[in-house]
Image: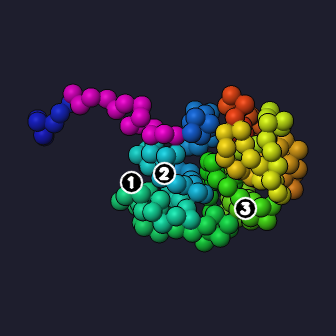
Amino acid sequence: MNTHMDTHAPPLTLRQQFGDIDIYVFDQLLRGRITPGMRILDAGCGGGRNLVYLLREGFQIFAVDAHAQAVDTVRRMAPHLPVENFRAEPVEAMSFPDAFADVVLSSAVLHFARDDEHFLAMLHSMWRVLKPGGMLFCRLASSIGIETKVQKLENRRFLLPDGSQRYLVDEEMLMRLTKSLGGHLLDPLKTTVVQQQRAMTTWVVGK
């Protein structure tokens, strides 16, 4: 027996445990919708801010991002996993098979769509890789609550009061898309308006 083991190591801080996880992803964890043993696919993972806890707790993690540097960052976070779990490819052209994941995460990705065609290509790609009975979690910019504050540019791209340009959805569109996908809302739409500068909506759909 190793009698020199340090049993007084300081507990992990919340940031060490959870990283910069989206609080609405954290909410899904607390409510038991993302559980160990599930296969989680982060579509547009960026630097992996939503994966810190999931990787440490042994979830089956897969991710894609169009930027190879972001994918390399996530691979370094998970050297114990096969490199092919993390792929440098656009969300709309994911190479994972149909009905692959129990949960697909899309946090701050869809509002970078160039136009309707690009938005729908990303959405249908994520829906394709989701298993029946699975959960699609999307957090994206919307016009909900700031309709009079945004300036339409073209298609569904708008200039926001904070100076950024985003592809914006609204409630009618999200409800229509939910129906056209053949899905159902797992939660009511929830929108956070940040001091009339931007609005972020959480859209959680069951397949």
Percent x, y for residue 39? 56, 55
Q: Earlier in the sequence, mark 3 or mark 2?
A: 2
**Is residue 43 positioned above or below 141 on the image?**
below
Q: Nearer the viewer, residue 92 or 118?
A: 118
Label at residue 114: 3
Residue at image location 38% in from the left, 37% down from the top: 16
Percent x, y for residue 138? 68, 47
On the picture, is 119 further left or further right than 155?
Answer: left
Percent x, y for residue 101? 62, 58
Q: CA distance from mark 1 to mark 3?
A: 30 Å
Q: Which residue is mark 2?
A: 48
On the picture, is 6 further left or further right than 48?
Answer: left
Local crowd size for mark 1, using a 10 Å CA cut-off: few (<14), some (14–19), many (≥20):
some
**Is residue 169 positioned above or below 154 on the image?**
above
On the picture, is 41 further left or further right than 160?
Answer: left
Percent x, y for residue 74? 44, 57
Please provide the residue range marked out in magenta.
8-21
Question: Is residue 203 something one can see in this rendering?
Answer: no
Residue at image location 52% in from the left, 40% down from the top: 21
Residue at image location 16% in from the left, 36% down from the top: 5
Q: Nearer the viewer, residue 121 or 129?
A: 121
Q: Is residue 82 magenta?
A: no
Which secondary structure, mark 1?
A: helix
Q: Which residue is mark 1?
A: 77
